[in-house]
């Protein structure tokens, strides 16, 4: 899984059981529209307590608006010992909005 098209397909095919969609945009961006069921954790707010909670998921799929902050969050999570992280760095919510995919 490398891009938001892959995420959209996985959601529609119910392939994300025990996975977390982790939106690392700002709270304001998240309030402006996000994927249903996604958790918002801004990339600059990641701390050890949050990392511990994320270990319970089979996969944590990290994304942002365009890919840059997702990459930073991925490296922070990985360096903190989280090995179940997938980084969507080819595109992000900008692409999601452009395609007209559903948001809440």
Image (spheres, rainbow, N blue to C red):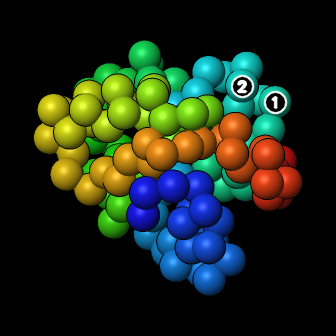
Q: x%, y% of residue 73?
A: 36, 30
- SS under mark 2: helix
- SS under mark 1: loop
Q: x%, y% of residue 8?
A: 64, 65
Residue visible at 51% across and 24% down in the picture = 42
Residue under label 2: 29
Residue visible at 69% across and 45% down in the picture = 95
Q: x%, y% of residue 44?
A: 43, 16
Count of marks overlaid on the render: 2
Residue visible at 66% across and 55% down in the picture = 37
- Pick the residue in front: 55 or 36: 36
Is residue 26 positioned above or below 67 on the image? above
Residue found farthest to the bottom: 13
Residue visible at 62% across and 21% down in the picture = 26
Q: Is residue 17 visible?
A: yes
Q: Is residue 41 visible?
A: no
Mark linked to residue 57: none
Q: Does residue 29 appear to the left or right of 50 in the view shown?
A: right
- Pick the residue in front: 48 or 24: 24
Is residue 67 positioned above or below 5 on the image? above
Residue under label 1: 32
Residue 47 quadrant: top left
Image quarter where the N terminus lies is bottom left
CB under 8 Å between discs 2 and 1: yes
Task: Please rate how many residues cluster around mark 1, counting C-alpha atoms within 10 Å: few if below 14, some from 14 to 19, many from 20.
Answer: few
Task: Please rate how many residues cluster around mark 2, counting C-alpha atoms within 10 Å: few if below 14, some from 14 to 19, many from 20.
Answer: some
């Amino acid at each position: 899984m490398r891009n938001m098209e892959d995420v959209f397909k996985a959601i529609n095919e119910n392939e994300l059981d025990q996975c977390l969609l982790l939106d690392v945009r700002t709270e304001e961006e998240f309030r402006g529209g996000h994927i249903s069921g996604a958790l918002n954790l801004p990339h600059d707010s990641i701390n050890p307590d949050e990392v511990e909670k994320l270990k319970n998921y089979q996969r944590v799929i990290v994304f942002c608006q365009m890919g840059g902050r997702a990459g930073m969050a991925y490296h922070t999570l990985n360096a903190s010992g989280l090995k179940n992280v997938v980084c969507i760095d080819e595109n992000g919510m900008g692409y999601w909005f452009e395609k007209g995919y559903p948001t809440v």
